[in-house]
Image (cartoon, rainbow, N blue to C red):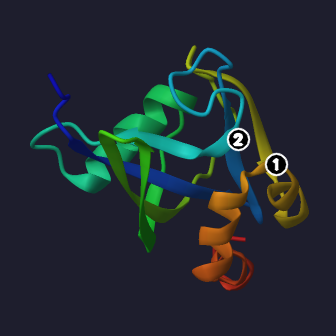
């Protein structure tokens, strides 16, 4: 019997404070992409508003309250032949930098552009480049 194909929706936040972006490192035991760095976020639950889902995920994963500015970009990829993710990434700000990390993650970093380019996976960097995320961060009032 073949598995049913699923499409899941996720939200991510490029959270900026004083020109740096918060990224988190997935636990090595994670189901998908263990040990890699990523912006904060997660899955949208059925019936949930996208921005409320992002605020909930950020609170659960790093314990921060955020202000959401606007959508940066949307992308999609398959995690396996039966599971496709749609990710909507928002530009956000946080006045607080005191992170309380969830058990799903093992580290965090408030990273400048050079650190982001070194730590983030190529697929995320490609999305950042294609969607001019670095220039938006640089020229935003969030820095």
Residue under label 1, please give it. 119
Q: Marks 2 and 1: CB-CB under 8 Å? A: yes
- Depth order, front residue of 74/52: 74
Secondary structure at numbered mark 2: strand
Horizontal arrangement in the rendering, residue 131 relative to residue 37 (left or right):
left
Residue 82 position by quadrant = top left
Q: Residue at x 33, y 48 (%)?
A: 84
Residue 102: % across, % down: 56, 19
Q: Eyeballing the image, is 109 above or below 11?
A: above
The residue under the point 13% across, 39% down is 46
| Crowdedness near tag 1: few (<14), some (14–19) or many (≥20) residues, C-alpha within 10 Å | some
From the top left corner, tell me how far across and down residue 56 is, in percent.
35, 37
Q: Residues within 10 Å of mark 2 (few under 14, many from 20)?
A: many
Indicate which disc, 2 or 1, sits on the residue closer to the N terminus: 2
Q: Residue 16 sits in which quadrant?
A: bottom right
Helix, strand or loop status at disc 1: helix
Q: Which residue is drawn at 66% across and 70% down?
A: 126
Q: Seen in the image, is 12 located left or right of residue 43?
A: right
Residue closest to the eye, 139 or 24: 24
Quadrant of the image for the C terminus?
Answer: bottom right
Q: Quadrant of the N terminus?
A: top left
Mark identifier at residue 11: none
Image coordinates for residue 66, horizontal then vertical, percent:
48, 50
> In this view of the protein, which residue sits in the foreground, 56 or 125?
125
Instruction: Point out residue 79 in the picture as x, y percentages from the top left corner.
Output: 45, 41
Nearer the observer, 31 or 128: 31
Q: Mark 2 points at which residue?
A: 37
């Amino acid at each position: 019997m073949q598995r049913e194909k699923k499409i899941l929706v996720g939200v991510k936040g490029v959270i900026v404070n004083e020109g740096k972006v918060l990224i988190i490192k997935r636990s090595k035991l994670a189901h998908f992409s263990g040990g890699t760095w990523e912006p904060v976020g997660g899955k949208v639950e059925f019936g949930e508003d996208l921005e409320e889902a992002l605020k909930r995920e950020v609170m659960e994963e790093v314990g921060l309250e955020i202000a959401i500015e606007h959508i940066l970009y949307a992308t999609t990829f398959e995690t396996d032949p039966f599971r496709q993710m749609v990710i909507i990434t928002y530009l956000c700000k946080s006045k607080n930098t005191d992170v309380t990390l969830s058990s799903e993650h093992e580290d965090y970093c408030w990273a400048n552009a050079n650190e982001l380019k070194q730590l983030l996976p190529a697929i995320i960097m490609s999305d950042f480049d294609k969607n001019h995320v670095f220039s938006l961060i640089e020229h935003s009032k969030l820095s």
